[in-house]
Image: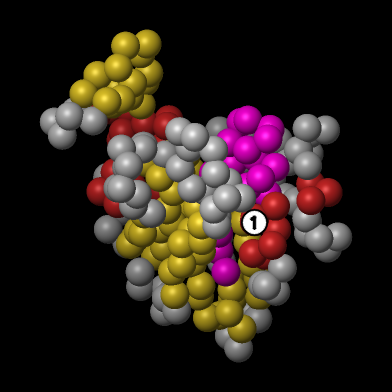
Amino acid sequence: MNAENFKLKIASYDTLTLYLTKREEIKDENGFSSRRIPRSDLDFQKIREHLLQIDADILAIQNLRNEAEALNILSEDYSCFVNKRSTQSHREIGICWKKNKFSISNIQIHKADIPLFFKAQYNQERFVELQIPIGKSYYSFWSVYLYKDKERRIDQLYLLNNLLRKNKNFFVLGNFNDPLYSAHFPGKLFQKDFQFLTQDFT
């Protein structure tokens, strides 16, 4: 990004790569069930070094439990916000930023109104929006997690599209669980001037 002579590097990261999985559920010290098994300290160090090389000014994060989980793989230059639910879900989303580079204007959690997403056993869908003043304009950076289930993903996209119609300068980051250029991704749900750009850091 290079807006109003302001250079900015943005990226997205799914923390599920921090864990191995097993078929049997295990419980942590708080009694929460999970199939996640933390990787070794060496694995965490490699991930940390990888993210340091990317050196993103703003980093959207998905599939984590709290800020500490994100800060464990980031340098002290970052601050993070994570959406906290009252459930035991490990599929939280959040966003991190270099705290010495930005004057944070606002952080919002957008959630669906019932009954649009009312489905038994499902939580309300949520998106995290970070607003930052850059030059004379405000820019929004969204962290999203879209589900693999096509029906749920379409519901999420309807909500996201309606929210984005209110914005002019925005970037949507996250785990879309389906390539944006595939025939299965319903990009037609978005306004005509919505452009998709993807890049994998592997």
x and y percentages locating residue 185 in the rendered image: 76, 38
Badge 1: few (under 14), some or many (20 or more) residues near its Cα, within 10 Å?
many
Q: Is residue 60 covered in magenta?
A: no
Q: Is 42 left or right of 98, judged from the image as shown?
A: left
Callout 1: SS: helix
Outermost residue, bottom side: 136
x and y percentages locating residue 200 in the rendered image: 62, 38
- Name the residue located 21 percent from the left edge and 23 percent from the top edge: 27
Which of the pair 135/119 is nearer the observer?
119
Q: Is residue 163 above or below residue 150?
A: below
| Residue 1 appears in the rendering | no
Q: Which residues are magenta?
A: 140-157
x and y percentages locating residue 10 in the rendered image: 55, 57
Residue 82 location, quadrant:
bottom left
Quarter of the figure with the C terminus:
top right
Which of the pair 156/145 is nearer the observer?
156
- Name the residue located 65 percent from the left edge and 40 percent from the top edge: 153
- Name the residue located 79 percent from the left edge and 46 percent from the top edge: 187
Residue 141 location, quadrant:
bottom right
Q: Is residue 6 above or below residue 68?
A: below
Quarter of the figure with the N terminus:
bottom right
| Residue 30 appears in the rendering | yes
Residue under pointer 1:
160
Type of the residue with mark 1: Leu
